[in-house]
Image (spheres, rainbow, N blue to C red):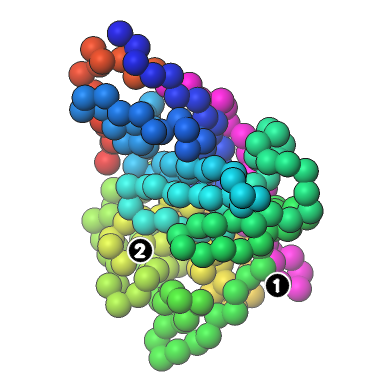
Amino acid sequence: MIRKVVNGYDLHVHGQLMRVVHGDEVRYTTGDYDVQELLLNEPRGSKYMNLVIYEFSGERLHVTIKTHSKVHNSGVMLKGLVHTLIERGGLPEGDAYEVVYDGNSFILHRDHLDASPLTDAVQLEGTYKVGGATVGVLETDVYLAIENISEIKRRLTAQNEWDYTVYLNGNSLMVIDRYGGVIPHPVHEVLSVLHELKRWEVITHINGAEVDINASGKEYDHPFYFISNSQFYIDDTDIYSKGFIIK
């Protein structure tokens, strides 16, 4: 028997996946069924999915982001959320929006939703500091391409004293977080360091995404792409009460 129908939509930027739902959609549980877990884990079981839960109240957009690992590029994701909610009629017309996320409140301007300024990278001994994150850059002879991911995982590891370990091989790059996870999309702090270090105007990530940085090196574009509307049915005869993920 179908107990609940959950509606939302999916989008991505440079391969970073977002599943967006209103808070009302995830306030339901029945037996062992966890709606938020199901939305994270279905339908393809991607461990890189980000579940974005939003509510607009009191002239503020309240946002929670859930993931299987760590949230990267939260500022970029929040801009994509606001952009798509405006397009879909989920936010009133306006020039700026107050967003509450992770205990902080800040303003996002409508005309700056598809680009972000690069944060200054400060060089320290053997590493870089970007905002509150540390980034280390290492050269490697490993072929850095998604089809070589098994060899990459076998030979390359995170340096645990850094938040992000960046491996370079020519014009190719990949990033590992401090917990050993390969990050499948460009990360804001890494872009800042590589532009400072290499003065690259186009940065190509392991997933094939190309990030264009404007000539002055002050910002980069991150347009969002709508994938599909999502509709999920919670059926109490389903044996997968929490879905599954493919690692």
Q: Mark 2 points at which residue?
A: 177
Residue 194, quarter of picture: bottom right
Upstream in the sequence, badge 1 or badge 2?
Answer: 2
Residue 210 seen in the current view: no
The magenta segment is 208-232
- Rounded to the nearest angstrom, the CA distance separating label 1 from label 2 is 25 Å
Secondary structure of the residue carrying numbered label 2: strand
Q: Name the residue under label 1.
A: 217
Residue shown at 74% from the left, 65% from the top: 214
Residue lying furthest top: 1
Q: Nearer the viewer, residue 43 or 6?
A: 6
In the rendered image, which quarter contains the C terminus? top left
The crowding category of the residue bearing disc 2, from other C-alpha atoms within 10 Å (few below 14, some 14 to 19, many at least 20), is: many
Provide residue 197's location: percent of width, then percent of height.
56, 79
Residue 180 seen in the current view: yes
Query: In the figure, is residue 52 to the left or right of 156?
Result: right
Q: Tag 2: residue type?
A: Asp
Query: In the figure, is residue 90 to the left or right of 144?
Result: right
Query: Within the magenta stretch, is there residue 217?
Result: yes
Q: Tag 1: residue type?
A: Gly
Query: Within the magenta stretch, is there residue 189?
Result: no
Q: How many marks?
A: 2
Residue shown at 30% from the left, 28% from the top: 29
Provide residue 163's location: percent of width, then percent of height.
37, 71
Residue lying furthest bottom: 125
Residue shown at 35% from the left, 12% from the top: 2
